[in-house]
Image: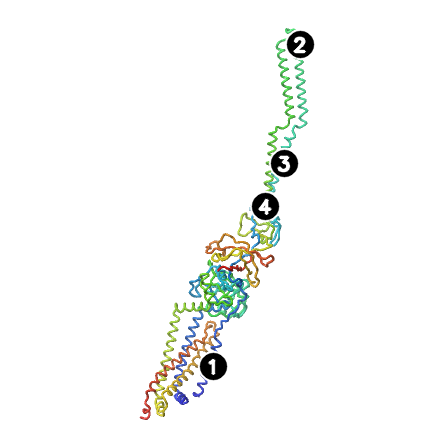
Amino acid sequence: MIKYGLPLFAALALTFAVVKIVRSQPVHAKLTPPAAPPSAVYTSQVGAVGLAEAESENIAISLPVPGLVTRVDVKAGDHVRKGARLFSLDDRDLQAELALRQSSLALSESRFGKLAMSPRPEDLPPAEAKVRESEQLYQDAAVQLNLIESVRDKRAIRDEDLQRRRLAVKAAEARLDGAKAELALLKAGTWKPDLDVARAEVEEAHRQVERVEADLARLVVTAPIDGEILQCKVHPGEYAQAGPLAQPLILMGATARLNVRADIDEQDAWRVKSGAIATGTVRGNSGERLPLHFVRVEPYVIPKRNLTGDSTERVDTRVLQVIFALDRGARVYAGQQLDVFIDAGGQK
Amino acid sequence: MNFVAVQMLIGDRAKYLGLIFAVAFSTFLMSHQSTIFAGIMDRTTSQIKDVQDANIWVMDQKTQYFDEVKALTDDDVYRVRSVPGVEWAVPLFKGLPRAKAFDGNFRVVIMMGVDDASLVGAPRDMVLGSPEDLRKPDSVLVDRVGYEFFFPQQPYVLGKTLELNDRRVTIQGIFNSSAPFQNLPIFYARYSNAMTYVGRERNLLSFVLAKAQPGLSDDELCRRIDAATGLHAATGKQFGWQTIRYYIAHTGIPVNFGITIAIALVVGTIVAGQTFYIFTLENLKQFGALKAIGVTNWRITGMILLQALMVGLIGYSIGIAMTAAFFEITKGNLDLRGFVLFWQIAAGTGAVVLFIVMAASLMSIRRVLVLEPAVVFRG
């Protein structure tokens, strides 16, 4: 038993141990990633993160005046022509003001018209009659004076009467002159400076109306370029703030062709030369390499924008931005991130 | 003559068995303790080894080991990509958020965030679900330890929810992980999500994982990345050893196990040596008779060494089988997983056992060699 059993048992035990040891050794097989990561394209290259944007850059439509939105004429994805109406603000108070201004324009116009049309024809006959009356009165006074003067014997008349009649003639003459002058004044119509003032008043009323109309026009927001509405975050009934906003009311841009804005760490910036070719892949589809064509380098190196975008973040890196153009019809959306590889060939 | 030696050995049943037991238990103790030690050290590198699809880890230059990392900036991924010879590079996040179950149970977990697009580093040894399920919204993969902690005695089903940093997450997969040092649950999420599950920190990129272009060695690429970026690049193996060295240098674990292994070695040697010595002394007469009939000293030395080898082999076989059986039994236990009897340990123990039996036999050989054959007949 001891003689053969124990060695046999030991042999079995050893076999068991060897088998278990061989079987239990950890295997660290090298696997391939679940989805292929974007892989190197050029022998010498600079990696960067890129953001697709409209060829015109993305335009955040802003307002010159705040107000209540009453009407939105576009939705995201619409293609609009330059000058097309995007949305309108509440204009009721300005419409009321316009009516007011228009009525004061009408008032000043009619005031001017009245002045321009004087004399009123009906005013002339009484004045002419007055002249004639004055003339007759003058004639009468002249006749009276003549009668008394034709008396040869001066003693027959009182000196007082003579004097009175002479003066009566002069007075009648003056009255006639006065009536004639009044008629002339009436016939001459409005004095020119008065007319000028009235004309200026009309002009001013015109400008007032135009100003209100301009204010009204500002309440209608129109497309500044031909392009596509990328984002429409404004709805009827909302109060739209003026000036630049964190969340633009409407984001639009010319998207017939997209550009890619690549952020390059400042430490690698020196390796990128103007005119470099590049390749980009969208996240999740690293198999399709999209050719990128150099457009320009943004000459100013800016602080890196962090993913979290927190305002308390301190800046530790700055990035050089290089703009590349995607091919027309590339299956990329504006705002999509791309992994960009820029050829740095020839530099080492 | 060899037959005589074997007969001589097994003739004394008590000492024969005593010798074998001494060797067997010494073997068991040494290999078992070494395995536990190696297993604990190995655990510190579990998360490094579990990344099976990237070879190169890029980290801050001052990083000592895996569990303490200083975050890099997001741009560093692109800087690594810019190094000539890098086939690809992706970010990897590691953090320690607190996960809460809706019944109030909570635990700190190891949160790994893998690149959103490629999922490089995601676990592959899935029990339920697939790595691709990480793409679902608010999806996390949890290891079995985590699942069984939060949902004890419940069958594995997907779709259960937990809370991480006030965010609700859905378990979309359960996987087998290599046990981490502290046996914390391990969660995987996409990089962009994982960052929201820990508190606010400015930089969150823990590691960059990279792969060398075909034809370029990993070591050469590590050198290039070091030179080009000023960061530290290491292969997974180097990083693992770096982590192990940290634990060996900064914890009492190696001292503890070292003492146990040394005692096993000393006790094994002494017990086996003493028994063998007594055994040889008792058989001096037989050796004397052999010498008298003209057997050379060389031949007798060979006989003694054969006896020693036989004892050693049988004892070692039984001892190592005991160790293998122990780890076979504990294999299924979640908390003891990852302890593996490495072949290096088995071989090393074998060498030490060989040394023990050789040393034990050599102690007694001297007596036989100086033996006068006449002694036998003196009565």
Q: Which mark is residue A150?
A: 2
Asked whether, in this view, residue B27 is left or right of residue A278, the answer is: left
Q: Percent position (x, y) of residue A234?
A: 58, 51
Q: Image point 49% across, 73% down: which residue?
A: A27
* C-alpha span from label 2 to label 1: 180 Å
Q: Chain of mark 4?
A: A
Comes first in the chain, label 2 or label 1: 1
Task: Determine contact: label 2, label 3, CB under 8 Å.
Answer: no
Chain that bears disc 3: A
Where disc 3 sits, the SS reads helix
Q: Do circles 1 and 3 both sit on a common chain?
A: yes
Front position in the image: A234 or B217? B217
Dot 4 corresponds to which residue? Answer: A219
Same chain for marks 2 and 3?
yes
Among numbered discs 4 and 2, the one appearing first in the sequence: 2
- Which label's residue is closer to the chain start, 3 or 4? 3
How far is disc 2 from disc 3 in space, using C-alphas?
A: 65 Å
Q: Which of the two labelled residues, at mark 2 and mark 3, occupies the earlier sequence position? A: 3
Is any atom of residue B109 visible in this view? no
Discs 4, 2: same chain: yes
The residue that mark 1 highlights is: A15
